[in-house]
Image: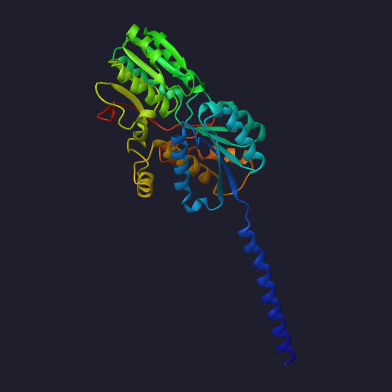
């Protein structure tokens, strides 16, 4: 009996001990520190349509189980460099972020040096300014580039249409200046005269002065590189009001977005732009379906860019919290990434560029050129 009693006591102690050992393990899983991503978006002001679309793309990505240990903290950058810098400092010092998403060349460029200083990886989108990813080993760009906008497809279109003289209107920031430089160099190397190269300030919606100069010179085509839908649609409306008949080439992608252009493109305007595979239904069909079910409309192309940034982080980290240096290493080790914009190469310098297609807008629809 004594042995039996002793055995019962030992067994009870063992069971109690085992339960005691298991409980801290459960607590460790419950209190596992989350990976925290700061997201700087234009959530107010004229570029809000981009911020809202990117945010919705990130939120749809978050519905996947792979995001259960990743938190996104949002701040409004108002598409302003100074506001973006202030918001970044808050995310770094107060929210203790592990990585940051940024938007636009005008905010991504000044943030690159801060990301390197703090060893916080930064992924920038909607940013076509030259060489953003080269500014820091901690900077990545998941976006189209100025070189894509003014690259082989654009050049082929200009040559195919036989333009001898062109004019350029561009927003005076990193993106617009980069595009303008590439256009001017291309024209010079191909005996095409640039009759007009007019910079405008960010937020400009009245282009009557620039368009009057264009009408006076009458070149074969007007090329423009503007940043926001408000800027772009302001120009398109005034082109139509002034009954300009020459070809119009958007050296960007704003007008590929149905929500942005609305019904603003009417005959007789002859206009070309660029489109991501997602906009043409060539990729991201599952994301499109989820978005349509949730919002009862077709998704703007920025939804796919937000979705892809979030999925890239999840795929690289598997939800594990890690140092900035380790996160950079993990992203580069992927080498390629399959997202809503198709398969993209992750280049050693941090460039991740989705494919762009040259299109013409016909009856308010995108037609491959």
Residue 23 location (% of width, % of height): 65, 67
Relative to the observer, which residue lies in front, 358 or 88?
88
Q: Residue at x 34, y 30 (%)?
A: 261
Above or below residue 123? Residue 180 is: above
Figure quadrant of residue 233: top left
Counting from the top left corner in percent of width and height, residue 112 is at 59, 29
Identity of the residue drawn at 49% across and 28% down: 127
Q: Quadrant of residue 27?
A: bottom right
In the rendered image, residue 345, in percent from the top left (x then y), is placed at 46, 34
Depth check, front residue: 101 or 199: 199
* Residue 107 placement: quadrant: top right
Relative to 296, 312 lies left or right: right
Q: Percent x, y for residue 32?
A: 62, 55
From the viewer's side, name the closer residue of 218 and 204: 204
Residue 157 visible in this rendered orientation of the protein: yes
Q: Is residue 90 left or right of residue 226?
A: right
Residue 356 as seen in the image, left or right of residue 17: left
Q: How many marks?
A: 0
Residue 337 seen by the camera: no
């Amino acid at each position: 009996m004594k042995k039996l009693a002793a055995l019962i006591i030992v067994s009870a102690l063992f069971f109690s001990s085992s339960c005691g050992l298991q409980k801290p393990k459960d607590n460790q899983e419950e209190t596992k520190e989350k990976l925290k991503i700061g997201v700087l978006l234009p959530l107010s002001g004229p570029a809000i349509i981009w911020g809202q679309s990117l945010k919705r793309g990130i939120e749809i990505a978050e519905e996947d189980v792979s995001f259960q240990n990743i938190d996104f903290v949002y701040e409004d950058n108002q598409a302003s460099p100074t506001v973006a810098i202030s918001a970044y400092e808050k995310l770094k010092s107060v929210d203790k972020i592990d990585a940051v998403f940024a938007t636009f060349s005008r905010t991504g460029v000044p943030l690159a040096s801060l990301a390197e200083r703090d060893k916080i990886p930064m992924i920038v989108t909607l940013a076509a300014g030259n060489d953003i990813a080269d500014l820091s080993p901690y900077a990545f760009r998941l976006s189209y580039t100025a070189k894509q906008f003014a690259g082989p497809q654009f050049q082929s279109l200009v040559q195919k249409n036989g333009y001898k003289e062109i004019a350029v209107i561009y927003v005076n920031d990193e993106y617009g200046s980069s595009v303008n430089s590439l256009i001017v160099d291309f024209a010079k190397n191909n005996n095409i005269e640039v009759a007009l190269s007019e910079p405008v300030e960010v937020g400009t919606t009245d282009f009557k002065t620039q368009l009057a100069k264009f009408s006076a010179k009458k070149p074969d085509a007007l090329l423009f590189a503007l940043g926001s839908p408000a800027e772009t649609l302001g120009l398109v409306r005034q082109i139509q009001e002034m009954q300009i008949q020459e070809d119009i080439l958007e050296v960007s992608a704003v007008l590929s977005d149905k929500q942005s252009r609305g019904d603003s493109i009417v005959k007789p305007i002859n206009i070309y732009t660029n489109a991501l595979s997602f906009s043409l239904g060539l990729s991201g069909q599952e994301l499109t379906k989820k978005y349509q079910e949730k919002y009862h409309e077709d998704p703007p192309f920025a939804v796919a860019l937000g979705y892809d940034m979030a999925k890239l982080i999840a795929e690289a980290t598997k939800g594990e919290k890690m140092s900035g240096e380790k996160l950079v290493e993990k992203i580069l080790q992927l080498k390629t990434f399959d997202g809503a914009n198709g398969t993209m190469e992750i280049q050693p310098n941090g460039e991740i560029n989705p494919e762009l297609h040259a299109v013409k807008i016909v009856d308010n629809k995108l037609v491959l050129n």
